[in-house]
Amino acid sequence: MTAAASYPYDFLIVGAGLFGSCFARIATDNGHRVKVIDRRPHIAGNCYTEEKERIHIHRYGPHIFHTSNEAVWAFINRFATFNNFVNSPLALSRGQLLSLPFNMNTFYQLWQTRTPDEARARIEEQRLQLDRPAANLEEQALSLVGHDIYERLILGYTQKQWQKHPRDLPAEIIRRLPVRFTYDNNYFNDRYQGIPVDGYTQVFNRLLEGIDVQVGVDYHESREYWESQGAQIVYTGKIDELFGYSQGELEYRALKFEDTWHQQRNVQGNAVINYCDADVPWTRMIEHKHFSPQADDPDCSVLTKETPMAWSRTETPYYPVNNDANMAIYKAYAEQAGRLDRYILGGRLAEYKYYDMHAVIGSALLRCQSMGLAVDDRR
Ligand code: UDP
């Protein structure tokens, strides 16, 4: 696997996000020479956090780490100390704040049902009865929680987020959300959860410690040069861009972030508030300091309004739109990629996958192991 000694490095990693940085660390730990480049002016991809007034601002949207995968948890704990943050977002709908995920608190707030049996009965009477798997997001939502919650908490948010009707979206998007018949506002079911105490960027600094990293370098601008270096190329950018968009362009959703600073310690009282009504353009308001409560709480706070936007090639891609049409295009590229020599593709953009952070790390660990690279995941 090691390239000839005359080459300057064994692996060129394109992209300093999660997949690329984990791969870089493991390859380096296994004695390989690694170089990492990223077209953005910083490392950490969309996990990037920026520190201002002692607050870690999640620059590309809220990132809450959660996993049940022991190997992933052990591996990432080599580079991060997690706090005990538990994600309990609230949802604003028609002037009322409701609990998420859909649980006994939400059902009580909506219907004043007090027991699981009462809540189940209320859902049962308005639920879509299906004798086959849901064919789209609307069917999935209606069959799981019924009409009221679909109308109040899902329809408007989803249309804003994806610019498509839930009927035209895959059911998988909403399978992410738990439905619980307990009074439990924890958004995730995973065993481990938290936020790195000194921000995500520091985690990436540690992952990439001692590795040659160059930011502000666009692989595609000098592809021939990089290919001539003889290294294996770990490519984590957009798969359609790798093939010059020859089979068509894959669709993404973009996001706009607007910050407001307040001379106030606590503005909204929670890290995340979702805005579910269709007539408000933004989907989330984030008060970053609540991700990492600290003893010396600064007497100011920053809130970020997150508004989904149409995506174009020049914008940062956030969410892949994994509907049938896009998946057919992706499949054609993936087949082409399988025939490429020397390329290893991974991560959200190269696999066109709506990945959570822990799943990206898991896939990087597996990929490395499948290549014979040892992974140190001892806690
Ligand atoms: N969703 C919704 N209402 C909400 C939160 C989520 O309808 O208040 C739906 C929406 O379609 C969204 C999907 O559930 O795209 C997944 O939500 P999640 O919070 O997991 O999205 P992420 O944090 O990845 O943006």
Image (cartoon, rainbow, N blue to C red):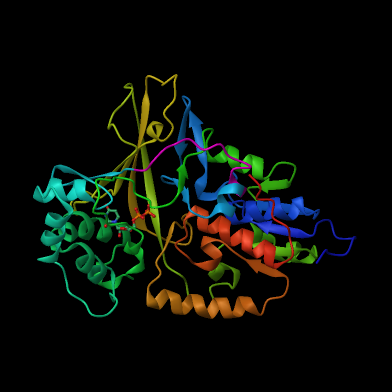
Q: Residue at x 48, y 53 (%)?
A: 68
Decide: is 273 above or below 115: above
Q: Residue 229 sits in which quadrant? A: bottom right
Q: Position of residue 251 (x, y in %)?
A: 42, 67
Q: Quadrant of residue 235?
A: bottom right
Tell me which segment is drawn in magenta: 75-87
Say which residue appears at 27% left-offset and 54% top-offset: 180
Q: Residue at x 56, y 65 (%)?
A: 350
Give the farthest residue toward the right: 6
Judged by its main secondary structure, the magenta piece is loop
Image position of 355 with respect to 285: above or below = below
Q: Residue at x 60, y 56 (%)?
A: 19
Where is ligand 1, by quadrant? bottom left
Is residue 261 left or right of 50 when viewed as pictured? left
Residue in the foreground of this view, choosing between 327 and 311: 327
Picture quadrant of residue 170: bottom left
Residue 249 visible, this angle: yes
Residue 342, magenta (yes or no): no
At which x and y percent is residue 194?
A: 46, 41
Determine whether, in the image, residue 195 is placed left or right of residue 237.
left
Q: Quadrant of the C terminus?
A: top right
The x and y percentages for residue 93 are 17, 48
Question: In the shown orientation, is residue 212 left or right of residue 117?
Answer: right
Quadrant assignment for the N terminus: bottom right
**x, y percent for residue 105:** 20, 45
Q: Does residue 17 appear to the left or right of 132 in the view shown?
A: right
